[in-house]
Structures are given as structure tokens and as C-alpha cells.
Amino acid sequence: MRRHAPRALAFLALLAAPLSAQRPTIAVGVRPYVSVDTPVVALTHARLIDGTGAPARVDQTVIIRDGTIAALGDARSVIVPAGAQVIDLTGKSVIPGLVMVHEHLFYPTGPGVYANLAESFTRLYLAGGVTSMRTGGNMNGFGDFGIKRDIDAGRKPGPWLDATAPYLEGPGLGLDQVHELTGADDARRMVNFWGDAGATSFKTYMHISRAELGAAIEEAHKRGFKVTGHLCSVTYREAAALGIDDLEHGFFAATDFVADKKPDECPGQGAGQTALAAVDPNGEAVRSLITELVRRHVALTSTLTIFETFVPGRPLPPGLDILEPQLRAQFEQRHAAVAKSASSPYIALYAKAAAMELAFARAGGLLLVGTDPTGGGGVIPGYSNQRALELLVESGFTPLEAIRIGTLNGATFLGRADRVGSIALGKQADLVVVAGNPSARIGDVRNVQLVFKEGVGYDPAKLIDSVRGKVGLF
């Protein structure tokens, strides 16, 4: 009798799973990218990496019913329901869908010009295993909100989006696509206008003042929205005191260590990074700042993928072959020029900033991860999200820690950890099937074979092929 108890418990768990779940709607135009769409799916004999940081469990079965994880456990114990579509995953791993929090639906296509590539980028993110993401900055106004609605309605393939409003930025950036705030009242107006228009979070930028930042945070928090920032004029310590929820680019954007920093003035990214390069990562100034950020529950987003492109000697980023040929050539020329910069400050700066992100996490801070496909190009959605996990491991995290940062940590920050970010009974079936064992070899996250979002399985190869050579055009 004892020998059969696990099977009975697994069957009861299947029966107890939520009955109210509904399978997502899939429009005709999305169906070419779908390879699994049945009410009940059994993923059998998989290596399960649940996203919590716990060790991988081998020979596991996951039952998906109507987009929800209805049962999971040892393959010998979980009963596969009659009529289920069975997918044997022997030799493969299942991880949670990636939850990335510094992504964009635009890309640099010329000097000071950022093109709306929402159509191709959302497909690439999904193909790379990203099932939830925050856009982390918007150059396209209503465009990000429109494609979010289409994705939610099943009219287009892509991840669930936490869509940020256009940047909240003060005078000084000099980009025609970015509004310059005129004061605290303007910051409040922007938050309410874009909140009404469909934004669900806000990104503050380099030249915002403390008064504008404080007003934006206060107004956003009234509406239940979070605020992040790529800062310069405001220091990390000042932003934390004002109640900011997240800081972008790890410590790369911090101006806290600039000796002659003037209030509300951006000394330039170069000055901030020069000061950062000179600081002792184990010294009191860094420890004190980390302690303050952790005390105030300010998250930090790692974006090592963008900074890797500035470091001489680093490999070409993955995924360049899917770019429109002129954009690919443009980046390859830039990469070659960077490779010749033997005295680049980024050689030392990159390693130091990566070590500080590790120290932040070890001190109890909530470290998130994103990729930021802006800068000088070369950061390709989907491919770069996988690379981001590899770079976390290179920085000193274990593969299991890196996977947690890229899944459950992001879901926790977005307030969605009860639904996504880890593999657990009753959660949404946002899952990624990869060949190999990323809990031992993080590079295996590149081997994505199937991406489930709300229980629907998408074919990554078909999503990628639909935009190959055309990314930059739409």
C-alpha cells in the first residue's frame, strides 16, 4: 500500500488543481509558431530546475492542464492523464520562463535614432525563453502598450509585458524622441497621463532632478506603480531616500563616488565611471552604499550584456545573424574598433562593477537582470537574455543562483511570484525546455527547444526564422 501512496497523492493533486483556468486565445496569425496546444500536456522524465535555487531534480514529470501546472513530481509517481499529449524530455531540462526587467522594444538604427522593433523583438524574446519582461524605457509612446494588448489578447506572440512609460528625463540628453521635464508638476503630469494611457511602470533617466524624481515616485506609488532609474544627476543614495524601487545597470550608473558631485547635476557617465573605477570595491564607501540600498529594499538590475560590448577582447554577441545586414555590419565594425582599444577603462571597470553586483546580492539585496538592447547595438533580444545568465555565472554566481535571478527574482520584483518565476503546483505553466543541464553548465540555456507560455508551447526556431535577416525593419 505504501508503494502506491505517491501515485495516489499525485493523482489527488491533479484533481485539486484549479478548475477555473482558461486556455489562452491564439489567433490565426500566431498559430504558425505554436507546436503544442492541447488542454493537457505531460512533460515526462525531465530534469527540473524550479527557479528557487534548489538543486535540480531528475526524472520528473510535469502535468500542464489549461495553462496551469496541475501536478509535478517523480516520474514514477505522477499519473499521466488519459488523452494527455506526452512529451518525453529524457536528457533535457525544464526551467521557469525567464523574467527579465531591463528590456526594450527599440534599437539604435542611426546616430541618435531608435527604431520601434516591437514586432520582431517580442518574437525573439519569446524564442529565447523570456515569458515575462519589463520594457525598462519607452521611445515609442503608445506602441509598447498596443503590442502588449495584442499579446494579451493572443493576436501576436510574445512575453507578458510590464510596459514602462516614455522616459522621465530632465534637460540635457538631447534626443528628440525624449520629452524634457520642466519641473515636479510636469513629472506628476507625465506619470498620470501615461498611467491612464496604459503604462504599468516608470523609468527615470540621467538628468532628472531630485524634486522631479521625488514627485514621480510619489505619484507612481499612489497608483501602485514602481519606478526604476538609470541615474546620474541624482545619486543612488539620494534616490533610495526618495523611495525609488530599482536602480538600473548595477553600479555602472552610480555617481555616488564622484568627489565634486553637485546636487541635481549629471557630471557625465564618464566621470561617474572614472570614480567607480578608482573606488575600492571592498572599502567602506561601497559597503555603506550597499547597506543603505539593502536597508531601503531597493533592487538592482544587472545589465552586463550591454557593458560587455564596450570591453576589448570580449566575443561577438550571439544572434547577430538575425539582424538586417547593414545593422549587422555596423555593429561588427564597432566591435572591431573596441577590440583595438587596449587602454579602454572598461577592462577594469567591467570586472569591478560585476564584483559589486555579487557583493550586493551576497549582502541580501534583490538582484535582477536584464539586457538593454540599446547602446551601440549588438544586444539581441532572446540571445542576450541567455547570455545575461552566463555573465552572472562568470561574475561568481552559481548556475542555480543565476537562473533564480533571471526567473524568481524578477517575478518577485514585478509582484507576480504567486503566478510565475518558479515551477510549482498551481502556478502558470511558463516553462522553457532546454537540451542539457544548465544547473551544471549555464551555457546550456542557449539550447532552447520549446517555450511554454500559459501552457501553450511555442517553437523557438519558427519564431526566429520569421524575422531572420530582417531585424531592424519592423
Image (cartoon, helix red, strand yellow):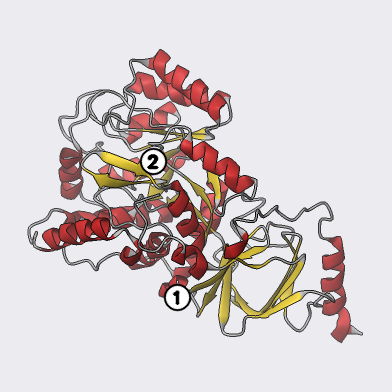
For the point 83% across and 66% down, the residue is 13
Please state if 87 lies on the left or on the right of 289 as rendered.
right
Q: In the rendered image, which residue does mark 1 sit on?
A: 444
For the point 31% across and 41% down, the residue is 114
Question: Marks 1 and 2, how far apart in space?
Answer: 29 Å
**Residue 139: % across, % down:** 38, 36
Question: Is disc 2 placed on a helix, strand or loop?
Answer: strand
Quarter of the image for residue 274 reads top left
Please state if 208 lies on the left or on the right of 259 as rendered.
right
Under mark 1, the amino acid is Asp
**Residue 399: % across, % down:** 45, 69
Vertical placement of residue 215 versus 460, above or below: above
Under mark 2, the amino acid is Leu
- The residue mark sitting in front, 1 or 2, is 1
Q: In the rendered image, which residue does mark 2 sit on?
A: 247
**Residue 57: % across, % down:** 62, 77
Judge whether residue 405 can be spotted in this image. Answer: no
For disc 1, the neighbor class at 10 Å (few under 14, some 14 to 19, many from 20) is some
Sequence order check, earlier mark of 1 and 2: 2
Please state if 229 lies on the left or on the right of 158 as rendered.
left
For the point 63% across and 79% down, the residue is 46
Judge whether residue 402 can be spotted in this image. Answer: yes
Between residues 424 and 381, which one lies in front from this camera angle? 381
Between residues 459 and 289, which one lies in front from this camera angle? 459
**Residue 55: % across, % down:** 56, 73
Question: Is disc 1 placed on a helix, strand or loop?
Answer: helix
| Residue occupying the far front of the picture | 28
Name the disc covering residue 346, or none: none
Vertical placement of residue 393 versus 61, above or below: above
The N terminus lies in quadrant: bottom right
For disc 2, the neighbor class at 10 Å (few under 14, some 14 to 19, many from 20) is many
